[in-house]
Amino acid sequence: MQQSNDDRVRIADAAFPKPFSYGLEFNAPAHGTWNIVHIGFKIPEAHQIYVCADNCMRGVVMTAAEMGELRRFSSVILEEDDMVHSGRLEETTIEGITDVLQSLEKVPPVVIVFPVCIHRFMGCDMDYIYGELNKRFPEVKFVRGFMDPVMQKRSTTPDQRLRKAMFDIIPELPSDGSVSVIGCDMRMDDANDIKKLLALSGKVIRDEADIATLDDYYSLGRAEYFVCSYPAGLLGASALSIRTKRPYRYLPFTFGYDAVDEGLRSLGTDIPEGFFEAGKKRCDEAASVLKDAIGNTEIQLDYTAVPRPLSLARFLLERSFDLTAVYADAFDPDEQRDYEWLAANHPDLLIRSTVHVRGRRPSRSENKILAIGQKAAWFTGTEYFVNMIEGGGLYGYSGIEKFLRLMEEAYNEPKDTRDIIPRKGIGCASLV
Amino acid sequence: MKKSYRILPVYTGDVSGFASALYELGGMCVIHDPSGCNSTYNTHDEIRWYDKESLIYISGLNDIDAITGNDDKLISNIIYAAEQMKPKFIALANSPLPYLNGTDFKGICRILEQKTGLPCFYVQTNAMHDYSRGASEALLAFARKFITKLPKHQGSKPGANVLGTTPLDLTATAIDISDEYDLISNWSYGTSFDEVIKAGSADINIVASSSGLATAEYMRDELGIPYRFIGDYLDVRREPSKRYIVGEPVTSGFVAAQLKRRYGADFNIIATTEITEGLLSECDRKCHGEEEIRTALADAEMIIADPLFELVAPKEAKFIRLPHFAMSGRLYLKEIPDLTKPEEYYHEP
């Protein structure tokens, strides 16, 4: 299947996993997803230092400012003269970071350094830089971040690599039989069957999204095994698992019952009799209640809301909801089976790009639309939307049941879309 | 070290300045950049993005295209987008990687003009300067491309253009020149392509921020249109003082002149944006970077500045908040006053 250069394509005609060819890109004013600044601040007491040009700096420093975290954020500005002399870029990076750290009231225990595309492009010797910084500040753990979006279309994203680098400082500690939940920015909701089953088994859970101190962060290394529930965390979870020789389970929020059963069984805990059947029954009932409430209201969803948007699309269409579009520029290859099912059974379902140039002029219906995710809310112009990213900390039948309730709530209670979706980082502190 | 900032944010960058200046002029602005510029711009540097259409895109440059200089892809993507969106013109902006590999933007513009039939121009940015430079270059490039001498404005008053009015500096400020002039064009906030292309008929230009100066000089040299500064602020003599206004030189000078005229108060400017030549009085100074700003403020008794500068201000100094969108973005958006109304933000101690 050929990639489309249009802003939408029927799923039956869509290339998988990348339905669209790349062109100029539009950016919708929906900013609830987390960026690398939000993610970096998850390490308590960590200080972030970015080394880049003015314009590139602006977005990250204002993210920190809007979070009220400027005291944990510093900058080293690159200028033209840093690019014309051999070794100058290394010198500016080292001396700038040194200057920042010496000017702080107290040298932080963890410093996340973010070089940028320019460092990549000029072949900057990052090992030399970190070697020198380690000599000057032996008490500091330097986390090797990168803000190099020039690499992200053909390689891993800065977000994925940052999460891995953050896990690199988690020490291998003696296991205390606990489970560490890592890689997702949303703390586990109570409507999460992973949390429920682990609690029933008496397991202590450490959730990276809920860590308050640096010691607690390091204690993530005491886990018997790790659970990762978000695709962008998988690279780091896998690397951590290899380094610590402890297993990990990868359990992104999905709406496929078989996948839920399989995922929950992989935890290796006792599962109460009838747990799955009761969960499925509750979900089916919740879906039925939702259907009665919203009838044939048009639904559109986007990829930022849940990590398995095609499994959600399939769930809804299997139950005769009027889902008409999925906004996504690429899919997780793990969603291939749901893609194939949708292409065979609902070939007219539209896959819509979120970055296509025509996105600047969205064609909006006057009919009531229920959107799932902020981007879908913007493109449809609706006030009725589920305001969620990364699956909202939900999992399993409890998660699906709650998700369906949230859809009903979104249908009944309009939101101030104009005020909500331009705000950055759902769940983060915001001074805006 | 001048390049390190312990706590202060940098100002809006030149690429965002480019986009802000051209926002309402009906063109398609393309930033040749991998990612991030567009999101940064529309989140932190632009108040119009949600409500008012403007065709501002990034090219989505990847590593291989940057290394191999694959300009064909950029060109074909722009042609496709222009066919889809029908802009009045195409403007291109640079970013660090194309800057490093010496991308021939002027050549690309020539090809685009041939293939699309649309006017196309390059704005010299590289993401390593502040917004005043980017906006200045954008307005100047637009003027060079479109502005010609026109028959003089016929009206009861002389006609004037106001230059440099982006929301980055004049977010909530309405510049009213109606006592003396008929407004010909406003560059470029609350305006349109059809309005600004009439600029060549004006009798005078009024420079409202440093971003407008280069265009004013261009129109003076090429079209014979003289210019003056907003509030003729440079004509107001101010004495050396330990009272400072921190920020962009023209708007800060305008505020200082009003405070002198109305209250007899002497404030000196600490200009913290890039374009300052010919824009400061003897008692004022230019500062670059957090360290210099901190040093310059060390003896301050009173400071009027964006609230974020309080992070580097001496505790003893009286601090008067004057939010500046190009510094604190939307953090204090609702507090940004009309600069022409000093009674709203200044109270004589």
Image (tube, coloured by chain):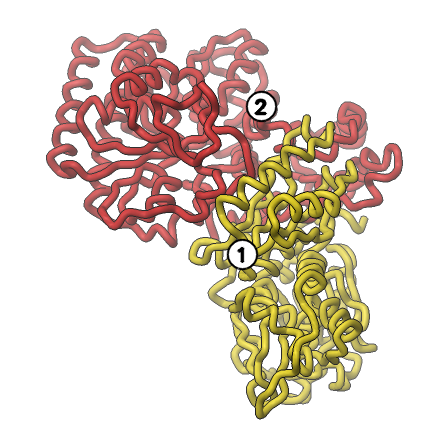
Q: Find disc 2 in the rendering and name its residue.
A: A156
Q: Position of residue B28 (x, y in %)?
A: 57, 51
For the point 48% across and 37% down, which residue is it? A34
Q: Chain of mark 1?
A: B
Question: Can residue B321 be seen?
Answer: no
Q: Are marks 1 and 2 in contact (CB under 8 Å)?
A: no
Q: Quadrant of residue A386?
A: top left
Tell me the number on the disc at residue B150.
Answer: none
Q: Amino acid at mark 1?
A: Glu
For the point 61% across and 69% down, which residue is it? B197
Observer-nearest residue: B210 or A217? Answer: B210
Q: What colour is chain A?
A: red
Q: Is residue A13 above or below residue B32?
A: above
Q: Find disc 1 in the rendering and name its residue.
A: B46
Q: What colour is chain B?
A: yellow
Is the residue marked by circle 1 packed among few (<14), some (14-19), or many (20+) residues within 10 Å?
many
Q: Is residue A80 above or below residue A222?
A: below
Indicate the quadrant containing the N terminus of chain A: top left, top right, bottom left or bottom right. Answer: top left
